[in-house]
Image: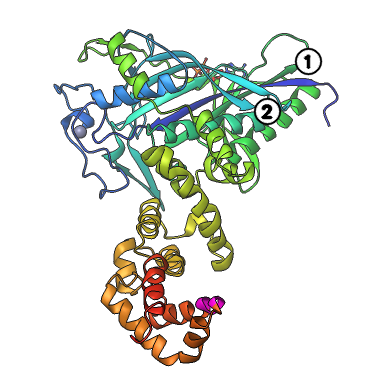
Amino acid sequence: MSARTYVTTVGVEVHVELATAAKMFCSCPNAPQDLLPNRAACPVCLGLPGVLPVINREAVRLGLRAALALNCRVNEIIWFERKNYIYPDLVKGYQISQYVRPLGEWGWLTIAGDDGKEKRVTIRRLHLEEDTCKLIHARDEARIDVNRSGVPLMEIVTEPVLRSGREAEEYARKLRAILVYNGISRCRIQHGEMRAEANVSIAPTDSGELGVRTEIKNQAGFNHMRSAIEYEVRRQADVLDAGGELRQETRGWDDANQRTFIQRSKEDAHDYRYFPEPDLPPARISTEWIEKERAALPPSYDAFVNGLGEKGLSRADIEALARNDALGFLGLAAEDRADKTVLFAKRLVKDVFSLVNSTGLPLDDAKLTPRSFRQAVFLLEDGRLNGEGFRRLLETLYREGGDAEMVAKSADLLVERDDAAVEQAIARVLAEAQLLVAEYRSGKTAVRNAIFGRVMKELRKKGNPKAVGPLLDKALETPGRD
Ligand code: ADP
Ligand code: MG
Ligand code: ZN
């Protein structure tokens, strides 16, 4: 326990890769995960002498969408600068970024603060830039993959207003939810599509000043970021309690040993020698464009979550779905918005979460994809699967993956849609169950359920109850035909 009391201050810098088709300044595909290494490479993203970059309008549009969704002020004229530094992952020797005039400034989002009240977190700036290459370290060599070089990147920086690791985690999760929900980035942490860095300082309570900060690099996940911040707060307090002085430095997080370690001190800090990118003209973000994008935004993320609550989803279920983006739920919501979202949500909670228990396979390791899940739900909705078939299909997709329709066909799960085949099955059952039929016709209509069950069994559980019911009733009302 620390002898004195301190206030903690945290500011978070987040990088996200934008979900565009092409890279930021060339027409190479933006698909670093899906291609073999070094297949998306051209003179522009390799930074060869004499090339001319061109701004990707779609990337600016997504940045603008993000700025609006995050309540930022949008700058009417923006431009790009060159940020110069030498590092193995930067084949160009510079990164095109925005420095003086970012796309968006002074936005905010809300989180549940440590005091339980709603807290507004101020976003200082939101700017566009390009990603670097990926370094792959294998045994005693390092390899380089340029597929990621030039992928559109957005950086979002908060004011130093967060008070703990918990608040920083809440902020990062909320930010991810908003970006995924609005179709701006997929934000898959495991693919490096979202990376968060935390700046942490402590200062004696009531000193009214900010302490010396350390920056914690590239966390693998939000829970790591929180642990790293909490460790850093304790470490800094120990240094100050012992009469020591803190230094501004960059630290990494060692998850195995649950501690941070020094990577770089302030003395090694870069002078990036920013200057306006000479190959790109300033860009105008017209009022018309801004208003068009604003009008195209869906209801706010908060409104969406509240709407799920009103449609009968519990707070805990919403947290599990939206906050953790279970099975790409927010992406499903982004595609199908109002009408289908509640349906997906209920099926996820009811059928997918129960598979986590029954199969013992965590959702993250399952082969079920947002796409195949969506297809399976639509097969059920269209009456091409019944409840039983849907559950069996989902379990197969969960364990083994595959295209929903193809798996349903090859596992013979699709319902029998041929009325003649259903009528034949009914006729066979009625011929065999004459006792039940007689009871039914003498007024004991409750036996209908039993007869119905036999018909479904005869159809090898592939009947569509909505189609079978009326055909059965017709047959029961028509004596003599069986
Ligand atoms: P840099 O240029 O080194 O990235 P910035 O001024 O852009 O520094 O700040 C980066 C992040 O650090 C911001 O989120 C900011 O709020 C935060 N920050 C700045 N000073 C402090 C501090 N003393 N304690 C905690 N966070 C800080
Ligand atoms: Mg920074
Ligand atoms: Zn290229």
**Which residue is drawn at the image coordinates 63% and 36% (left, top)?**
226
* Residue 416 x %, y %: 32, 72
Kindly tell me whether residue 192 is visible in this rendering.
no
In the rendered view, would you say 398 is above or below 163?
A: below
Kindly tell me whether residue 116 is visible in this rendering.
yes
Q: Residue furthest left?
A: 50
Q: Mark 2 vs mark 1: which is more N-terminal?
A: 2
Q: Secondary structure at mark 2?
A: loop
* Residue 163 x %, y %: 68, 23
Please tell me the numbered disc located at residue 205: 1
Q: Quadrant of residue 232?
A: top right
The magenta region covers 445-449
What amino acid is at disc 2? Ser
* Residue 155 x %, y %: 42, 24
**Which residue is drawn at the image coordinates 37% and 19% (left, top)?**
294
Q: Quadrant of residue 9?
A: top right
**Which residue is drawn at the image coordinates 60% and 33% (left, top)?**
169
Which secondary structure dominates the residues rendered in magenta?
Answer: helix
Question: Does the Cβ of the disc 2 residue fall within 8 Å of ligand 1?
Answer: no
Please tell me the numbered disc located at residue 463: none
Q: Looking at the rendering, in which quadrant would you find the C terminus? A: bottom left
**Mark 2 neighbour density, 10 Å: few (under 14) some (14–19) many (20 or more):** many
- Asked if the stretch drawn in magenta spans residue 72, the answer is no
Q: Kindly identify which residue carries mark 2.
A: 164
